[in-house]
């Protein structure tokens, strides 16, 4: 994508200014601007015209071309760094929820990492597509096979931090303020990372786990949206974080099915591995 200011030299070819000490024709300077906009580096262009990279940068600046930052220069892959600037669509709300559950942020290196089981590898590829990116998914075999996607972007880290997703987020992450109709998509993403359908005391149970604050927020949304019962949160008493142990929200039977239906109604993206629950649920699917 051409840098901001690129239109200046397309519409004013005869007024291209020449930096002091650099003897280039206007047509050459125009070519330099075009080549830089197409992705060539200042070093590559400098070699072609037999001048310094600093001279190339002067030509670009004099003509309103924004010089790429060091992080942009070192990036190997394309990526929409401002994807999370405005959460205004279902996919953005969903991926934000999944990052809130399974994402890892490292501020000093501006790293955003999402790790899932290797059986969910294709879901990471969907995330890369959402970011308009050609990022590569890497596979590892630790205790169990996992797949990871890594993004290095100060802008994305800043946007996520503004939304409450930051380094060491497990005990502090909360639901961000979202448009009313996007809240369930955030919850579905969070559930795909930190939730499950399981057997609990002989009952089919919908469950989601997290720090007490975010679980209370999800609980409140479910009560408001679906009029489900207010239930007591389960707190894991022997967790290593004794000051803030994780809480679990559980619903059984028909209320669990009601929640599952609501989360997936009209959804265009979800973790495929968790979708069979809708087909094998023992109760009939009826509209509420």
Image (tube, grey):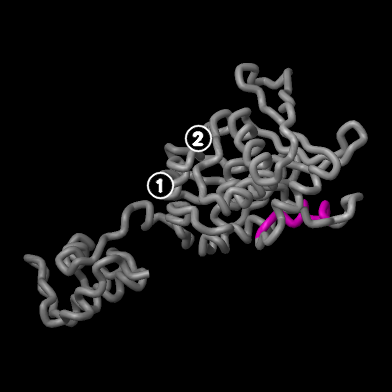
Residue 109: image x %, image y %?
Answer: 44, 41
Residue depicted at 16% across the width and 80% down the height = 12
| Up-down relation of residue 104 to residue 281 (above or below) | above
Measuring 78% from the left and 37% from the top, which residue is drawn there?
251
Q: How many marks?
A: 2
Q: 10 Å neighbourhood of mark 2: few (<14), some, or many (≥20)?
A: some
> For the magenta stretch, what is the residue range?
269-278
Q: Is residue 72 left or right of residue 141?
A: left
Position of residue 206 in the picture relative to residue 100 (left or right): right
Q: Is residue 88 left or right of residue 280?
A: left
Q: Residue at x 10, y 72 (%)?
A: 17
- Which quadrant of the structure image shows residue 206? top right
Q: Which residue is mark 2?
A: 167
Which of the two residues, 214 or 69, is positioned nearer the viewer here?
A: 214
| Quadrant in which residue 28 is drawn | bottom left
Q: Secondary structure at mark 2?
A: loop
Say which residue appears at 49% left-offset and 37% top-offset.
Answer: 166
| Magenta run includes residue 135 | no
Residue bearing the label numbered 1:
154
> Residue 266, position in %: x, y?
68, 61
Give the mark, 1 or 2, whose residue is nearer the N terminus. Answer: 1
Q: Is residue 179 visible?
A: yes
Q: Is residue 140 visible?
A: no
Quarter containing the N terminus:
bottom left
Magenta stretch: residue 277 in it?
yes
Q: Secondary structure at mark 1?
A: helix
Most distant residue in the left direction = 20
Q: CA distance from mark 1 to mark 2?
A: 13 Å
Pick the residue in front: 165 or 117. Answer: 165
Q: Nearer the viewer, residue 150 or 238?
A: 238
């Amino acid at each position: 994508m051409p840098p901001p200011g690129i239109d200046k030299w397309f519409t004013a070819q005869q007024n291209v200014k020449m930096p002091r000490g650099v003897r280039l024709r206007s047509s050459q300077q125009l070519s330099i601007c075009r080549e830089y906009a197409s992705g060539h580096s200042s070093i590559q262009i400098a070699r072609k015209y037999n001048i310094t990279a600093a001279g190339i940068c002067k030509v670009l600046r004099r003509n309103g071309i924004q010089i790429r930052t060091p992080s942009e220069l070192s990036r190997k892959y394309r990526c929409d760094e401002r994807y999370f600037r405005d959460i205004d669509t279902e996919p953005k709300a969903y991926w934000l929820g999944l990052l809130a559950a399974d994402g890892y942020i490292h501020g000093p290196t501006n790293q955003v990492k999402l790790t899932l089981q290797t059986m969910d590898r294709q879901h990471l590829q969907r995330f890369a597509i959402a970011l308009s990116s050609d990022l590569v998914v890497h596979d590892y075999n630790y205790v169990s096979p996992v797949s990871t996607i890594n993004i290095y972007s100060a802008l994305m880290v800043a946007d996520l931090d503004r939304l409450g997703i930051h380094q060491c987020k497990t005990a502090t992450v909360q639901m961000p303020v979202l448009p009313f109709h996007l809240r369930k998509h955030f919850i579905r993403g969070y559930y795909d990372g930190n939730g499950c359908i399981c057997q609990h005391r002989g009952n089919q149970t919908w469950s989601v786990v997290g720090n007490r604050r975010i679980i209370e927020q999800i609980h409140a949304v479910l009560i408001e949206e679906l009029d489900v019962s207010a239930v007591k949160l389960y707190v894991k008493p022997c967790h290593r974080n004794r000051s803030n142990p994780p809480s679990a929200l559980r619903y059984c039977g028909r209320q669990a099915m009601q929640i599952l239906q609501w989360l997936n109604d009209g959804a265009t993206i979800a973790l495929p591995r968790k979708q069979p629950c809708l087909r094998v649920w023992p109760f009939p699917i009826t509209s509420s």
